[in-house]
């Protein structure tokens, strides 16, 4: 089964969007990044074999969280 990837991205119009990879519309919109993180972490964790990719305001990846079976485990 393919891993479900979700992105917490800055919205060009303001705020932050949680969006599933390949989706045209956001799963949910947030006014602040902290609000987005509070919802996104438990939401994505509930999905089987999923990944949350959090970006900075400039669009660069800040961090990634992988949940479920991770066949590519690296030390560190």
Image (spheres, helix red, strand yellow):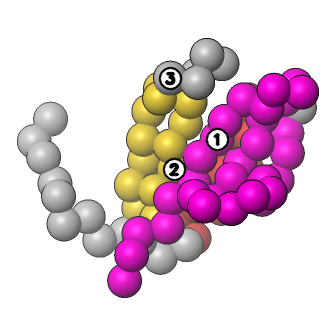
| Residue 23 horizontal/vertical position (percent) | 68, 62
Which of disc 1 and disc 2 is earlier in sequence?
Answer: 1
Look at mark 2 in the image and give the residue it sits on.
52
Mark 1 → mark 3, Cα distance in angstroms: 11 Å
Which of disc 3 and disc 1 is earlier in sequence?
Answer: 1
Residue 7 located within the stretch drawn in magenta: yes
Q: Are marks 2 and 1 in contact (CB under 8 Å)?
A: yes
| Residue 63 horizontal/vertical position (percent) | 44, 33
Mark 3 → mark 2, Cα distance in angstroms: 14 Å
- Count residues near mark 1 (Cα–Cα under 10 Å), then give few for <14, some for 14-19, many for 20+: many
Give the camera-side residue of 65 and 7: 7
| Residue 28 horizontal/vertical position (percent) | 82, 53
Q: Residue at x 87, y 25 (%)?
A: 14
Look at mark 3 in the image and give the residue it sits on.
60
- Count residues near mark 3 (Cα–Cα under 10 Å), then give few for <14, some for 14-19, many for 20+: few
Q: Residue at x 58, y 24 (%)?
A: 59
51 in relation to 63, above or below: below
Location of the C terminus by quadrant is top left
Q: Are marks 1 and 3 in contact (CB under 8 Å)?
A: no
Look at mark 1 in the image and give the residue it sits on.
8
Furthest residue in direction top, as rendered: 58
- The quarter holding residue 20 reads bottom right
SS for callout 3: loop
Q: Residue at x 59, y 46 (%)?
A: 7
Residue 22 located within the stretch drawn in magenta: yes
- The quarter holding residue 32 reads top right
Q: Which residues are magenta?
A: 1-30
Can residue 38 be spotted in the picture? no
Counting every numbered tag in the picture gives: 3
């Amino acid at each position: 089964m393919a891993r479900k990837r979700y992105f917490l991205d800055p919205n060009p119009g303001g705020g932050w969007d949680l969006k599933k990879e390949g989706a045209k519309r956001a799963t949910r919109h947030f006014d602040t990044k902290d609000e987005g993180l509070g919802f996104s972490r438990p939401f994505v964790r509930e999905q089987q074999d999923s990944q949350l990719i959090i970006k900075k305001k400039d669009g660069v990846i800040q961090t990634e969280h992988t949940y479920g079976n991770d066949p590519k485990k690296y030390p560190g």
